[in-house]
Amino acid sequence: MADQYRVRVTEDETEFVCGTHQDLLAAAVAQQVRSIKRGCRGGGCGMCKVQVLDGAYDLGKSSVAILPPAEREQGYVLACKTIPKSDLKIRVTTES
Amino acid sequence: MGIMRLGRVEVRVLDLEKSIDYYSNVIGLQLTARENGRAYFKAWDEEDHHSLIITEADHPGLVHMAFKVRFERELDEYEKALEQYGVRVNRVSKGTRIAEGQAIRFELPTGHLVELYHDIERVGNGLKLNPDPYPENLKGIAPPLLDHLLITGEDVQAATDLLMKVFDFHMSERVVTVDGEQLLAVWLFRTNTPHDIAIIKGPNGKLHHFAFNLGSWNDILRAADCLAKNNVAFDVPPTRHGITRGTTIYFFDPSGNRNEVFSGGYIPHEDFTPVTWTEDQLGRGIFYHMRELNERFTTALT
């Protein structure tokens, strides 16, 4: 099993790596990838909402008020609460 | 007479255990009780059983805020006054939550639930006979007191009118449109601090932050060190507010509820003439040094 995965951000063609116990936002910030907005980092505000287009992940406790079940089914996640389980392709959303 | 202070806030959290650890060990409050899905805390210099309740839920935010009144009979008086003002009032019976007596409950025009109460178990601060200045074994930031909260709502004027007319809140500061026509934000007090509650234009029913009091700018710096050591997410590191003149840090609890530690500011009295800021100067009013609001400060709400 890999100890880190590659995360591709489709809009700006950037890529960063994320540890298997690291959340996407922390990894992006550490590598100066600024396309994901940084909010409360606690799963509560929704600023870091992204859509996973491809790949497997675990989503930690996130507010249903800003990430309702219907969105979760479409692959929307909060980057601050998402741990990759494979390489990922993500799309930065503008709505949140 | 009347409202003495912001007595408590109840907030929803996503993970109770993580939040108990944060509020106990990083903020440094005293855990006074817990029950299924809820925990109760007080700050070290407070005498009442609790000033913060955290309740586990699937989304964060404010459940209610409560103001403590000087006398129990004032619950009846305010119930009448609110009803005359056209606001529906409910009774919250004794024992609904741990250590609390009865309360009256109503909704602000901004959709936030407010309670008024007098009766709550007094546990004391242990500093009433030949005392030391502060107790032993404080943890984390260890603020002495809960200070204020900031809520967002669409009709700032209506909520302000209710609080000033029914409860005799006084205005310390306000933000208005450049033409002076519309009230965009307001800071209101019943104590001698610049605010016990503030309201800013935004979505109804949301919490912007609740704040704990600290004694000095040096305590603010030390609090920032404590937050950094514990890997807490900052919103805005130590700086000064133009509004209230207080010093501040904004940061987030583990569920994304914004917390503040606040120190200083002036001491207003009932005859204080409100300070007015125009909307174009809001950046300087909120963050006196940077003179601009970051996007997170205005959009991250719970």
Image: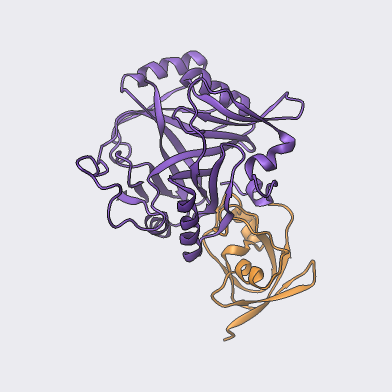
Chain colours: A orange, B purple
Which residue occupies the extreme bottom position in the image? Answer: A1
Q: Which residue is rendered at x = 46% and y = 21% of the image?
A: B167
Residue B45 visible here: yes
- Please name whichever residue, A74 or A5, is drawn nearer the observer in this view of the structure: A5
Question: Where's residue A81, x and y in %?
Answer: 57, 64
Which residue occupies the extreme top position in the image? Answer: B84
- Please name whichever residue, B23 or B155, is drawn nearer the observer in this view of the structure: B23
Left or right of residue B69: residue A68: right
Q: Is residue B28 above or below residue B121?
A: below
Residue B207 visible here: no
Question: Where's residue B253, x and y in %?
Answer: 49, 54
Report which quarter residue B69 is drawn in. Answer: top left
Question: Where's residue B129, x and y in %?
Answer: 19, 41
- Please name whichever residue, B55 or B157, is drawn nearer the observer in this view of the structure: B157
Question: Where's residue B188, x and y in %?
Answer: 53, 29
Q: Is residue B255 above or below residue A1?
A: above
